[in-house]
Amino acid sequence: MAPIIPQEIEGRRSISAHIGRQILDVITAGMYSDPRMALREYVQNAADSIDASIEAGVCLVPEGSISITLDGKTRSILVEDNGLGIKNEDVETRLGGLGCSSKGGGGHRGFRGIGRLGGLAYCDLLRFETRSDAREKVAVIEWSGKALREQVASAKGSEHVEAAIRRIATIHFRAADKHADPAHFCRVEMVNVHRFHADVLMNIKGLREYLSQIVPAPYDRNKFRFAEKIERHLSEVSGYRSYSITLNGTPIVRPFQEQVVLRAEHEDRIMDVKLLELKTPDGRLICRGWYAMSQFMSAMPPNVTMRGIRVRQGNIGVGDEDFLKASFIEPRFATWHIGELHVGEGLKLNARRDGFEESPEYELFLEWSSGVCRLLSSFCRQSSKERSDKQLQLRVGMAMDRLLENTFFLDEDHKMAAIKAAEMQLAQLRKMNPAGEVSTKLVNDYEARVSGLRQKSMFLSDVLNGRSIGRKSGEQVLTEVCKRILDAVPGIAGTTLLREIVAPYVREQKSNS
């Protein structure tokens, strides 16, 4: 068959694209699965602004700060940084456009120019205030969440996104307040925050726990003595930096500490940390990280907020504790561990910031991290086996002690009852046997004892000393036995046992009435 030669198609031209206003709904309400992710975006942008300020020589590293203020009475959230800010002449382009970020991804955590609108879905008004120089006025851009929702619900489906933005976003400039407005800053305010999903945005305790796991806050050196060792190791990862971040005036720190409370009166402890590194074949650093060495006793409950091997980029959390769950030999092992993997700029985040886009470096990272998770899984299995061995040794020891107590039997019925109990115990021990060399030997020894019991046993008649009984009557022997019972089991328990023993030999008592 002759090859098909593509023919020139008459009238071919480029499509004139129409971007409707529904795109605003996608990048606001449809952007995140958790409303708190919007705050993560604002902290991320604040960190980038502080980095830019440091690079420009405007401020030093320790001077960069990010404050988050939650006001339950007015139902507002304020995120403010003392970073470089935005020039008055650039503010409309930077804060009024979509997907027009000037960051470009090079060394910046945010680069798509859409994350800043994430909070719009959860409040009535999203306000940005900024300036980059003391001589400038303060630029104010406001996005109306209420107007956005009204437009999305309206029937004007053909409206362009540009027209929709003109109807919901405004800009103006005001004189700076010398007390409230720094020379360079950016301030984001969510006004009239909606009650959504158990009101998580207004829950200060829950918000603090969330932020401690996600934002680029420092380790708590008072609770985590490995902090300095880890920070030195991570210092060469591109984009790694920690910032002074507060929530209602209280510093936020990462949740790591040496003590690990598993449940009431039961805890584990981090005894050491192991450092990790991944490089490309040509020597470029992709990832550095660490994992905790503990006793690996069990899965940690959800209230242990440091659980899981967390993935971070630019020192900001990517996904959650389950990011690498599928890489463990058994998924449940994911919550047995504590640690972090910090990736560099070579991996590109997806828009939701819960994963990365496909690339050769990301593929290399996945293969390497799967190997790390398999190693960590082996720690769990080894720890489980050792605990099973110890538990088995204890059970076998107790069972052996009970078996050895039977130096003789009263009669054949007593013997058969004891053997039956021993066989039931043996069946339970076989079920819990982890098939290790030590545990198998213990069970085999016990089984040999049970087999010996079947073949050779002594009865009471074989061990009685006729001389000690002499010419004593049955009544005398029974009386002596009863006295020994009361000596061995004093109190009410002994008296009750004595009555049960002598009951078959006591005459029926006649009533005096």
Image (spheres, grey):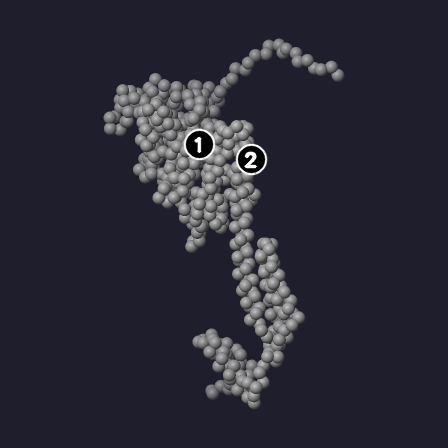
| Of the pair 234 and 417, the residue shown nearer to us | 234
Where on the picture, by quarter, is residue 98?
A: top left
Q: Is residue 411 above or below residue 27?
A: below
Percent position of residue 248, x then y: 32, 37
Relative side of 40 to 62, left or right: right
Mark 2 vs mark 1, CA separation in Å: 19 Å
| Of the pair 6 and 61, the residue shown nearer to us | 61
| Of the pair 380 and 112, the residue shown nearer to us | 380
Whichever of labels 2 and 1 marks the residue nearer the N terminus, that label is 1
Residue at which label 2 appears: 367
- Total count of labels: 2
Which mark, by number, is residue 237? Answer: 1
Which mark, by number, is residue 498? Answer: none
**Residue ID at (38%, 36%):** 217
| Of the pair 446 and 190, the residue shown nearer to us | 446
Name the amino acid type tagged 1: Val
Q: Nearer the viewer, mark 2 or mark 1?
A: 1
**Residue ID at (42%, 55%):** 265
**Residue ID at (62%, 61%):** 444
Question: Which element carries disc 1, helix, strand or loop?
Answer: loop
Where on the picture, by quarter, is residue 364?
A: top right
Name the amino acid type tagged 2: Glu
Question: Which element carries disc 2, helix, strand or loop?
Answer: helix
